[in-house]
Image: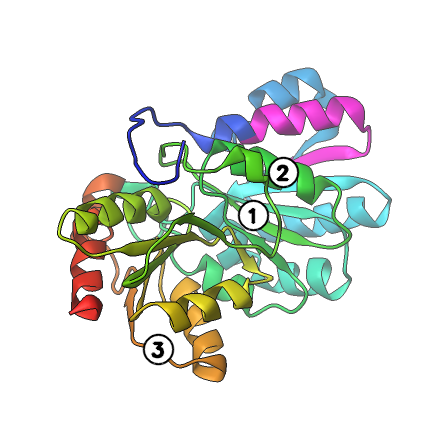
Amino acid sequence: MTSETMTQTAEFDCRKAFAETLIALARADERIVAVCNDSVGSSNLKEFEAAFPDRLVNVGIAEQNMVGVGAGLANAGLVPFVCSASPFLTGRAMEQVKVDAAYNGYHMVLCGMSPGMAYGELGPTHHSIEDLAWMRAIHDLTILVPADPFQTAEAVRWAAAAAGPVFMRVGRFKVPAVSRESEGFVVGRADELRQGSDVTLVATGTLVSRALRAAEELAAEGISARVINVSSLAPLDRACLIRAARETRGIVTAEEGVPQGGLGGAVAEVLAEAHPARMRILGVDAFAPTGDAAFLLDHFGLNAAGIARAARELAA
């Protein structure tokens, strides 16, 4: 469900769509393997391991080695899905992602599991709020942030057939369906989920459904909000963003991560060069206090109320 209203309340764990799709692909393609860092359970790979016990490599808590092993498997002609909690995959193995995966141009899929603040009470050591900014700094690395189960499944399928390295966030925080499945999933294309002429809300991942709810709240006040889902951060749909800047009074970006270098930074870079526009950039701007993921999103104003509040400032 998506489009003009958020009437569906069912929410889904995107890791389930990830696992089901990966297993289906592996049954059809013997080259597909999985590599993890003692995270079979949290990466939702138990069923994959049961179906293909010889095609899952568990390196233990050794993320740098994990990416290196994945690169070796890719060099041997296999298609490795390298799975780890996103803060450890991107933080501990940054050099290996840069050199082993991207510099060599290997076809391997780096799966940042449970990104953002999904681990809630475990605190900033387990929060992956910098991953998009870090990954955007690496040349020739495709970055995908699917917003719901349909996009997650489609992103896995696309990544399995890609020509080079891919980093993909796979969310743990349950989300409603927001995609228009009839329009498919296209890497490099942002999806305009709701028309609007006053202000544009640009969101990614878990924040897309919250942006849609903010648009409903604004509509009740007579403010017409366009909603754009950026599920492909690299490559980025520049044309869609520039068009929104030209046709509305300003842009609000919202993401479950630091905006410096993340979605907010990426959008600002495009508009500064092509069509400067008023912006409000929402994200995680400090180390988080203790609390579950829903509490933390509210704490940082990453909810419908916070997005709507920023939009009102631009529409005034």
Image quarter of residue 157: top right
What range is drawn magenta here? 18-39
Above-or-below relation of 221 to 197: above
- Residue 277: numbered disc: 3
Q: Earlier in the sequence, mark 3 or mark 1?
A: 1
Q: Residue at x 65, y 52 (%)?
A: 166
Crowding at dot 2, Cα within 10 Å, few <14 / some 14-19 / many 20+, comes out as: many
Q: Residue 261: in sight, yes or no?
A: no
Q: Residue at x 47, y 54 (%)?
A: 230
Crowding at dot 1, Cα within 10 Å, few <14 / some 14-19 / many 20+, comes out as: many
Display coloring: rainbow
Give yes or no for contact between labels 2 and 1 (Cβ–Cβ under 8 Å).
Answer: yes
Q: Residue at x 81, y 40 (%)?
A: 78
Q: List the residue tagged with mark 2.
A: 156
Q: Residue at x 50, y 26 (%)?
A: 16
Element type at mark 2:
helix
Q: Amino acid at mark 2?
A: Val
Q: Amino acid at mark 1?
A: Met
The image position of residue 144, as x and y in percent, is 55, 51
Q: Left of 302 or right of it: where is 141?
A: right
Q: List the residue tagged with mark 1.
A: 168
Give yes or no for contact between labels 3 and 1 (Cβ–Cβ under 8 Å).
Answer: no
- Residue 114: numbered disc: none
Q: Residue furthest right?
A: 76
Image quarter of residue 268: bottom left
Q: Left of 268 or right of it: where is 55?
A: right
The image position of residue 95, as x and y in percent, is 61, 64
> For the residues marked 3 and 2, what is the alpha-carbon distance in whole angstroms?
34 Å
Q: Amino acid at mark 3?
A: Ala
Q: Nearer the viewer, residue 108 or 231?
A: 231
Above-or-below relation of 296 to 13: below
Q: Left of 70 or right of it: where is 133?
A: left
